[in-house]
């Protein structure tokens, strides 16, 4: 299963503490015992046969049942213990999640937390994360649970220096003639929100020469007058209050972005994951 999930004997072997050669021999022994081929092999990657697909699904159910059995013994009192591997967006993680982490660690002294700060999408299963917190994004892949824990308003904004140089766009359609700073990741480019209500349902046409995969970097670029940005309130509320950024098109009303918790689908969610999600949800409900 490790080889199939990784698509490689070398990577799959590493997750099990084996060399690629040892992993290949172990799979060959399994195939010989079952009398079927489980993997197609070529010089660069491996893929599952139809028999391998069925075997992996059965194996996944077995491993999940083992995890549940171990969890029921390891934490009979339901208290979280052990290591929680967490992936969070860079700016949101530093500004919003870190204060919650401090509270969580104080409340649950038997938990350790390993945090990856990154705006890139992560593969929870392949990279070994227990939980990922994401802003907006696409629907969760198979085998991953997605839970909305909060919503934040998002604003179109620009620095006074940019507006003095390029002028204030008179209406939202005029954005197509301005420099917009866009978020992009390996899998998607940011889409700006719909026109609310009425006969307008098209996406705002935002164009620009600058695209980045960091919301904090987009904020800094907007503050420097490099263009117009679409950013969540938690990131720019202070800048707007101080006059360092100006909100554009307030007449459009409030648009929101969802904060999601993503975790591998299991019938019994580990107490570390469950309590952390509950704490985040309760805290963000108080402020959003």
Image (tube, rainbow, N blue to C red):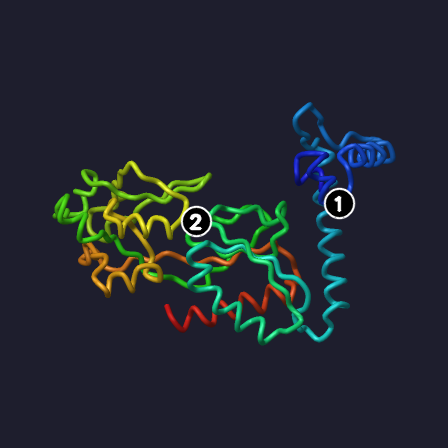
Q: Please indicate whether residue 61 sits to the left or right of residue 217 in the image.
A: right
Residue at 21% over, 46% down: 200
Image coordinates for residue 35, horizontal then vertical, percent: 85, 31
Name the residue carrying label 2.
137
Observer-nearest residue: 49 or 20?
A: 20
Image coordinates for residue 45, horizontal then vertical, percent: 66, 29
Q: Please indicate whether residue 40 sits to the left or right of residue 215 in the image.
A: right
Quadrant occupied by the C terminus: bottom left
Q: Please indicate whether residue 45 sits to the left or right of residue 232 in the image.
A: right
Name the residue carrying label 1.
16
Quadrant occupied by the N terminus: top right
Dot 2 falls on a residue whose secondary structure is: loop
Spatial CA distance of label 1 from label 2 is: 31 Å
N-terminal of the pair, mark 1 or mark 2, is 1
Q: Give neighbour class at mark 2: few <14, some 14-19, many 20+ (Cα, 10 Å).
A: some
Image coordinates for residue 117, horizontal then vertical, percent: 50, 54
Q: Give neighbour class at mark 1: few <14, some 14-19, many 20+ (Cα, 10 Å).
A: few
Q: Please indicate whether residue 45 sits to the left or right of residue 166 in the image.
A: right
Outermost residue toward the top in this view:
43
Observer-nearest residue: 233 or 98?
A: 98
Image coordinates for residue 211, horizontal then vertical, percent: 35, 40
Residue 51 against residue 77 in the figure, above or below: above
Residue at 33% over, 43% down: 182
Residue 282 against residue 58 in the figure, above or below: below
Dot 1 falls on a residue whose secondary structure is: loop
Residue 104 against residue 158 in the figure, above or below: below
Task: Kindly indicate the quadrant of the structure image that contains residue 274.
Answer: bottom right
Residue at 48% over, 46% down: 120
């Amino acid at each position: 299963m490790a080889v199939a999930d990784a698509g490689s004997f070398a990577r799959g072997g590493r997750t099990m503490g084996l060399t690629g050669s040892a992993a290949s021999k172990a799979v060959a022994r399994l195939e010989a015992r079952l009398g079927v081929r489980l993997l197609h092999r070529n010089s660069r990657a491996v893929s599952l046969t139809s028999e391998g697909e069925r075997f992996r699904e059965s194996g996944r159910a077995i491993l999940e049942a083992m995890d549940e059995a171990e969890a029921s013994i390891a934490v009979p009192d339901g208290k979280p213990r052990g290591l929680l591997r967490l992936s969070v967006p860079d700016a949101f993680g530093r500004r919003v999640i870190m204060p919650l982490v401090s509270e969580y660690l104080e409340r649950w002294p038997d938990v350790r937390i390993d945090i990856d700060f990154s705006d890139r999408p992560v593969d929870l299963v392949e990279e070994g994360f227990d939980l990922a917190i994401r802003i907006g994004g696409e629907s969760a892949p198979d085998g991953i649970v997605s839970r909305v824990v909060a919503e934040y308003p998002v604003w179109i904004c620009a620095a006074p220096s940019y507006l003095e140089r390029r002028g204030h766009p008179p209406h939202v359609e005029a954005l197509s003639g301005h420099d917009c700073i866009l978020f992009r990741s390996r899998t998607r480019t940011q889409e700006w929100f719909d026109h609310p209500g009425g006969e307008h349902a098209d996406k705002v046409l935002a164009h620009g020469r600058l695209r980045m995969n960091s919301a904090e970097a987009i904020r800094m670029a907007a503050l420097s007058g490099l263009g117009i940005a679409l950013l969540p309130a938690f990131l720019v509320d202070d800048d707007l209050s101080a006059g360092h950024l100006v909100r554009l098109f307030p007449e459009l009303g409030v648009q929101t972005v969802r904060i999601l918790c993503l975790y591998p689908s299991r019938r019994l969610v580990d107490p570390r994951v469950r309590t952390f999600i509950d704490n985040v949800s309760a805290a963000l409900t108080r402020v959003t």
